[in-house]
Amino acid sequence: MNTFGLPPGFVFGTATAAAQIEGAVHEGGRGESIWDAYARTHTNILDASSAAIACDHYHRYAEDFDLLSMLGGQVYRMSIAWPRIQPLGRGPAKPEGIAFYHRLLDALLDRGIEPWVTIYHWDLPQALQDAGGWQNRDTVDAFADYTRILRDEFGDKVAAWMTVNEPVVHTGVGHAIGRAAPGLMLLGSAFVVAHHLLLAHGTAVRILRETLSTPVGIVNNHSPVEPATGSERDAGLAALYDHYHNGQFASPVLTGAYPPQLGEVAGISFEVIRDGDMEIISVPLDFYGVNYYFPTRVGAAPPFYPVPFAPKEYVGLPVTDFGWPVMPYGLLKILTELKTSYPQMPPVYITENGCAYDDGPQGGLQGPGGALQDTRRIEFLEQHLAAIGEAVAAGIDVRGYFHWTLLDNWEWQEGYTKKFGLVRLEPATLERIPRASFYRYAEIIRSARGPNPT
Ligand code: IFM
């Protein structure tokens, strides 16, 4: 066991998503994604920006992967942009898109870094959205074809596959309340989107397994929930929110059934489920990806709110620049709850965890050695690794950690205003400047892997 109580063989890395870093949205024949369309309405994005340039990773990936080599992690979680592979979401693969991801995967493998690939991280081709997007069951078939292309092209280079990223956020924020692409306000009826995303997940697992033995998993966002007060009403609302946020996607995948309590949320109807769907959705997985950022306190919603529950402020906890409460213990808590609810859960990887702090020239101090002194990110990282160590000590099989993220990037509806990077991205020049947390994470990885990692 190392300093944080993490077992031998535990892997470290960073996580990212294509739409947030690549830029070059008009190059290589890439089609439009729902995020390109959503960002065209400037008021949708906090700083009225778009992902057109992002980190320009499309052109600078070699420099970014050199940074990864310096960091020393074994694994790198990235996503493939569906609109680069199939610009309209259907039809033959675009050769430039395929060639780009071959270059990317080769560059990682040349550096001895394992590519962990997310198939869908929220960037649906706009043409599919125009045909109903995830409300339309046909999108599952389109996703199946897209998965076949990725499997056949990249199957021998990818070390692990993740089907969909955080479907609870994509469904809830993007389709229920309209605060992210595609900007729909379906409220409870967004459940149809949830179900189709899960069907796409299970279908993709089967397709990958037809020819590959590579590990496959899903990535869910989890947040431990507590009632805002000791009242019975808040306890009930917190339990309902827990089913919505934590159960809606874990339970069908790990047990083959939705939490029945979801039916209490107005607009949610199970009528969309067809015979055989739950078997597809609950296909056994090789690993389960947990994204953890913050805990949630739940109380009653204000009048005319679309759902009965609402998040309430935590008193006394520090918050990140996103306003997210920092509670490392929450990671141990949610892992424990997941293990208790789903004893059959496969090995877990923490597929995302990180914090937004603008500790740059304006927001912080330039320290010795040129590193930006982001002490709060270092504490966040160390405390969350320690929480994972405690989970391991409690018998939970956690096998790796992906920090979100290497570079400051385009944080969706927050634009460039939230800085999650171990490496600062200088906005005007796109220069990459490692923060102190980058060097601290490198040291942690080095000491965990030993002097001569293979
Ligand atoms: O940037 C996002 C990522 O795309 C999905 N998980 C949460 C991150 C931080 O908000």
Image (spheres, rainbow, N blue to C red):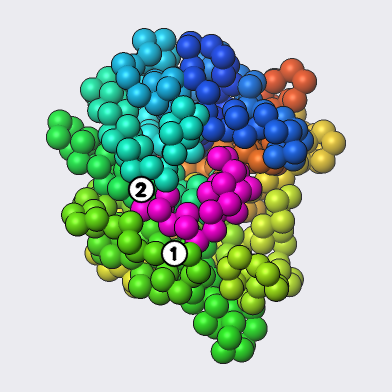
Q: Label 2 neighbourhood size at 10 Å, few (<14), some (14-19), many (20+)?
A: many
Q: Which comes before the other along the chain, label 2 or label 1? A: 2
What is the total number of numbered labels drawn onto the structure image? Answer: 2
Cα separation between marks 2 and 1: 14 Å
What amino acid is found at the position of numbered circle 1 in the picture? Ile
Please tell me in which quadrant of the rendered image residue 453 appears.
Answer: top left
Q: Quadrant of residue 20?
A: top right
Q: Outermost residue toward the left?
A: 210
Residue in view at x 72 percent, y 62 percent: 318
Q: Position of residue 169 (x, y in %)?
A: 52, 51
Q: Along the line of sight, which residue is nearer the eye, 437 or 92? A: 92
The amino acid on which the numbered mark 2 sits, given as a three-letter code, is His
| Most foreground residue, 149 or 58 | 149
432 vs 139, nearest the viewer: 139
Does the magenta run of residues contain 190? yes
Instruction: Return the residue at label 1.
Output: 268
Where does residue 308 sit, x and y in percent of width and height? 59, 73
Ligand 1 shown in quarter: top right
User: Which label sits on residue 363?
Assistant: none
Q: Secondary structure at mark 2?
A: helix
| Above or below: residue 222 compared with residue 93 | below
Which residues are the magenta region?
Answer: 174-196
Image point 22% across, 50% down: which residue? 280
Decide: is 51 above or below 283.
above
Q: Quadrant of the C terminus?
A: top left
**Horizontal and vertical percent for residue 263?**
41, 71
Q: Is residue 412 visible?
A: yes
Quick check: is the Cβ at mark 1 less than 8 Å away from ligand 1? no
Q: From the viewer's side, name the closer residue of 425 and 196.
A: 196
Provide the residue designation for mark 2.
196
How dense is the environment of label 1, judged by Cα within 10 Å: few (below 14), some, or many (20 and up)? some
Q: Is residue 30 magenta?
A: no
